[in-house]
Image (spheres, helix red, strand yellow):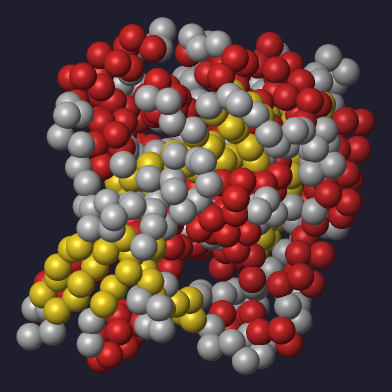
Amino acid sequence: MSHLVVKKKNEVYLQISSEPHVHRELADYFSFELPEAKFLKRQPRFRYWDGMIHLYSPGTGELYHGLLPHLKEWCREREYGIKFENNDWYGEVEVSNDFVSPPAVADWMKHICKYKPRDYQYMTVYKALKNNRGLFLSPTGSGKSLMIYSIVRYYAAADKKILLIVPTTSLVEQMIKDFKDYGWNADEFCHTIYSGKDKNTDKPVVISTWQSIYKFPKRYFDDIDCVIGDEAHLFKAKSLTGILTKLHNAKYRFGFTGTLDGSKTHKWVLEGLFGACEQVTKTDTLIKKGFLSSLRIKILVCKHDYKYFADFHEEMEYIVTHEKRNNLIKNIVNDIEGNTLVLFNYVEKHGEPLYELINNYISNDRSVFFVHGGTDTEDREQVRAITECESNAVIIASYGTFSTGINIKKLHNIVFASPSKSRVRNLQSIGRVLRKGDGKDIATLYDIADDISGRNYNYTLKHLIERIAIYQEENFKYETINIDLR
């Protein structure tokens, strides 16, 4: 019988020793074709790429530490023996902290936070502290920042150096604000890095965007003991995985995200970097328990005369410049009451015209804001804060700035002005409108879709079918309304 000897190379990789044929089998098992490979291979720079992501190197015997459960399952299926050896510096392959208990974690969280934690929150923190690693699926409104805060406070109290990575500058400031709201003097213990801020600090907690640190040399990360990735679904980019693989000494690794993109590749890469995946709770459960607003989805299918498009981009050009379609969005925003978020893809082609159209049409007593990638962090935070104090404002924002992480409790409506098939983007965007606020019990999504089909579905109509599949999977209620734009 073949057998494997496994030990830690560091806190990122395991080192596997075995027979040559086992290395080849492992290389096959931990290789995946990217869903977008067929499109990427059309580009000259990917001409000689096989379209595969390889998570195991038979030459070096290296495998991401977080994939250990999959390695053990693979060995069980093939009846291969597996033996663990200690590394003199990094210690045992598997470590479980038996001194951590659920009641103790619950008491700790109640002690450090002025808000009472929910059952699933302290159980998630318990699992994180017990196992040192984990990837936690925690939907919008589940109190993800409270769980992150509790982990940060635990390791800060243990004199560990913590790196908290978030995707946007807005989330850096929001995280600091949340920590203060929970009852901590975050300014004393937390250092933020973005937009040219000093990278050096003696404070135990560093909160940064990945864009601000991904070019830092490996030695900068040598003293980091704990890394936490917020919105971890964005960590599949090469620059982000580059940061995680530089953290050779970070024993404690935790990723939090609202959703994954559904591909096995994405999930296993993130598990490799952080640890085994756990579902914290689900959106429909939070709605049923009253933690989130009820959601109704109105799918508005715009009927067009048939038109041939050579590719997706040509169809999108037609859609975002369609006068009747943009007027429909304007009328929807004008007619509905409550704070409304309108999400678009293209700033100049779609965002700016929509802003001019809506701002010039609706009544003067409604505030209208325009937010995109070029908007300063301070201005975005000001828009968020102002909206929390209003009851009938309109935010016209790009998906990249407001689809992820922004916390606006008093958001009543969301309009998908641009079509998307991205599971992550759609669920993250819906999450913006589900947070409960004063006097808010129900939220409405207006999903604008387009039927320009002849014999076959057009590109964006196919995207609608994929969005509906997501709504069904998440148990969201929806209705379809046909609108004739011919």
- Residue 131 picture location, percent across and down: 26, 42
Question: Is 65 located above or below residue 399 in the figure?
Answer: below
Residue drawn 30% across and 80% down? Answer: 26
Residue drawn 20% across and 72% down? Answer: 5
Residue 298 makes an appearance in the image = no
Q: In this view, does 9 lie to the left or right of 208?
A: left
Q: Is residue 255 left or right of residue 405?
A: left
Residue drawn 36% across and 69% down? Answer: 63
200 or 282: nearer the eye?
200
Residue 205 makes an appearance in the image = yes
Q: In this view, does 471 lie to the left or right of 429?
A: left
- Residue 142 picture location, percent across and down: 40, 30
436 or 231: nearer the eye?
231
- Residue 112 picture location, percent across and down: 38, 12
- Residue 372 picture location, percent across and down: 79, 41
Residue drawn 77% across and 33% down? Answer: 197
* Quadrant, the N terminus: bottom left
